[in-house]
Image (cartoon, grey):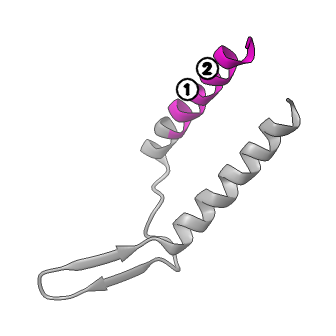
Amino acid sequence: MNQLPKTIMIIGVVIFAVGFLMQFIKLGRLPGDIIIKKENTTFYFPVMTSILVSVVLSGLLYIIGRFK
């Protein structure tokens, strides 16, 4: 039960760090993202951005899991 506050604090720090970094690192519009522009609409599907975020989060969670 003592690990719940520690876990919540780690999650908060990670969310803060991701929010801070997103101001400076513009994810999106990477090569491989699908952008379809028509007359009045634009469809944007971030395929490569999603893969990149997934790999980074998987690595981060793997590292956090090893310390428990």
Question: Dot 2: within a 10 Å radius of its alpha carbon, few (fewer than 14), some, or many (20 or more) residues?
Answer: few
Q: Is residue 56 above or below residue 9?
A: below
The residue at the point 78 percent across, 36 percent down is 64
Residue 55 location in percent, x, y?
69, 59
| Residue at the spot of label 1 | 12
Residue 27 lies in the magenta stretch: no
Question: The C terminus appears in which quarter of the rendering?
Answer: top right
**For the residue carrying disc 1, how many other residues have a C-alpha within 10 Å: few (<14), some (14-19), or many (20+)?**
few
Q: Is mark 1 on a helix, strand or loop?
A: helix
Instruction: Determine the residue located farthest toward the front in the rendered image.
Output: 1
> Residue 54 falls in which quadrant of the image?
bottom right
**Where is 41 relative to 5, above or below?**
below
From the viewer's perspective, is 61 left or right of 53? right
- Determine whether label 2 and label 1 are within 8 Å by CB: yes
Magenta segment range?
1-18
Q: Tag 2: residue type?
A: Met
Residue type, numbered disc 1: Gly
Give me the disc on residue 58.
none
Residue most extreme to the left: 40
Residue under pointer 2: 9
Instruction: Point out residue 1 in the picture as x, y percentages from the top left corner.
Output: 73, 14
Q: Look at 53% across and 65% down and name the residue there.
A: 49
| Element type where label 2 sits in the image | helix
Q: Is residue 17 magenta?
A: yes
- The residue positioned 48% from the left and 58% from the top of the image is 27
Residue at the farthest bottom position: 38
Q: Nearer the viewer, residue 7 or 37?
A: 7
